[in-house]
Image (spheres, rainbow, N blue to C red):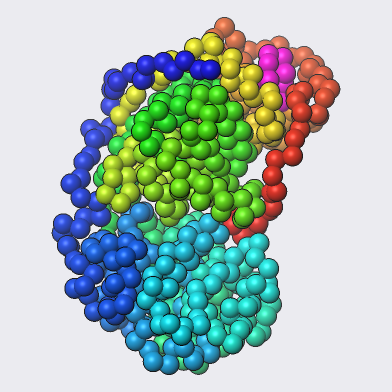
Amino acid sequence: MFVLLKPFAAVRATLGSPAVRRATAFYSTEALNLQVDQTALHLKVQDAFTKVASETLTEVQGRVIPEMLTTSNGVLVRAKTGTGKTYAFGLPVIDEWLKDKNFGKQESVHTVVINPTRDLAFQTQRALDKVWKDAAPRNNRRGIDLCVGQMKYDQIRRGVNGRFKSAALVATPGRLLDMLESDHSFANSFKDLRHFVIDEADVLCAHDFKEALLAIVSRIKENHQDPSLLKVTMFSATMDSNTKELARKLMGENYKYIDVSSGPEVTDTVNQSLVTTDSLFESFAVALKLVIEKLGVANGKVIVFMPNIKTTDFFYCLAKEVIGEYYGRKAEVCTLHGDLSQGARNRNQIRFRSAKTGVLVSSNVGARGMDFPGVNSVIQLGVQYETASHTHRVGRTGRAGTTGESISILTEHEMFYAGRLKKEGHEFEILDKPEITPEFANQITNVSRHIPSDINLMVTSLLGSYGSVPRIEKDGDPKSLALDCGDLYQKFMGEGNLPSVRAADLDRFRISSRDAEGVFNVRGNLRGGSNFGGYNRGNRTFGDRSEGSYKPRRSGNGYGGNFERKNFGNRRWDRNNKF
């Protein structure tokens, strides 16, 4: 049983401008203050929206809905995360379904909604379906269907190619393009498509889906009865050149641009703070200590975001054991990442949404557009490939009129990332880190040796994540980051146990044989990078070692450590939606 120490120390200093930014109303509804019954929406849509959401429209809804009801051109919308974008495009579309007397007999899908991930597609489908089921006429036979990875082709065709065509198809781009190119009858089911909605356009462009989106629209227009009737709507939290170029190619030059954002892409009801640690191991320990503290608050709900899938899996296994000893069944511990089957991801989301107290350990798959009610705190550990991920992770708290907090945990060698965030307008309060007692550290290491997550693979995945960060050699210290990964393994597995790492994975960090000695079990020959600077941890100095042979690889599981490998769920690879 853990003895929880007193709350960690108060604020000592501030990075950047004053960080506490309050707002009297979320969504900026004071400036708009538009009620749903003041719109030209069908009365049944108004009633259904009032039941499932609110009588008052958010700012993005109040500005986009009138435009979509009247415009014949496309609309590009810039709006912060968590501002109600789904209903901004969903309500006008459902309004058209109700006002068209021939809607039930149409032989074409009416609307396509593109989301970057399966999880966001499921969430979008559920949100729209709630309004549609409440507003639809009793004899309605048309539904809102899905076209995402891991769904069987026949299951997707059932709605699109059936007697009653899908009213809307919510899809991920990879699977939709695959279906359009491989099934002629499927492609013909969009011959009178009226709306093509792209949600999280900046995410899709960042993950190289721009060409896929252009190919999808081109394919649909090839079979369209009148392509001029197809209206494109795009939503994006950020507005870069890629997103604007995509808008021009899909909508031409005369599209309507609606900007509902100003300043940094973070809601004003979230306070951001920063904790600096001496090592990755301390970052993991601090994250666990903060989670334990946050769960002690009534109805405490926390999301912990990790750098990648393997670290997410590892921290989830660790947290489940540690938090279980402290809270037992009082707190749900769930995980969300791309290696889980879609069924497991859906179940975990439902568990976390319905939990009064709990923690969700997530990779980036849970960062964009996902809505988890009641989240008080977001904890982020480490750095990301793109700083935009930080913005969207912060946006998982402080939603629907509530306040929230985001705590970033960075090692001293990762502080270059805080500098990048500061340049983009993020402001942080500096918090003293909670005390990590030797007893707590020992508890963590003891638990780590019996969990079903591959610690060696987790460490090598961290190396891969660091190696993918742009300009890391300019802003940061790649060698120190890599050596800290090796030190992390020894902290968890015991001094003298070295992670097995390919030489090619270390060469990018300028690691020489002297650097690697006593830190990594290297497979292959290092190029012998230059030794500049050192990596100092306590009384150990890395970077000033004499040449020598590497320590032999440990016996056991072949990963440099001795622990039992267990079956840990049904995992599948989805090339289109893996985060």
Q: Is residue 360 above or below residue 479?
A: below
Q: Is 334 on the left or on the right of 79, as rendered?
A: right
Q: Is residue 292 above or below residue 400?
A: above
Q: Residue furthest right?
A: 555
Q: Is 37 on the left or on the right of 579, as rendered?
A: left
Q: Which residues are magenta?
A: 492-499
Q: Residue furthest top?
A: 539
Instruction: Tell which of 263 and 157 is nearer to you.
Output: 157
From this viewpoint, is residue 258 visible?
no
Which image quadrant is residue 428 in?
A: top left
The answer to if 297 sits in the magenta stretch is no
For the point 59% across and 14% down, the residue is 442
Q: x and y percent of residue 102 in the render?
A: 43, 92
For the point 36% across and 20% down, the residue is 7
For the point 51% across and 50% down, the residue is 349
From this viewpoint, is residue 449 visible?
yes
The answer to if 497 sits in the magenta stretch is yes
Which image quadrant is residue 409 in?
A: top left
What main secondary structure does the magenta stretch of the protein show?
loop
Q: Is 142 on the left or on the right of 396, as rendered?
A: right
For the point 81% across and 29% down, the residue is 558
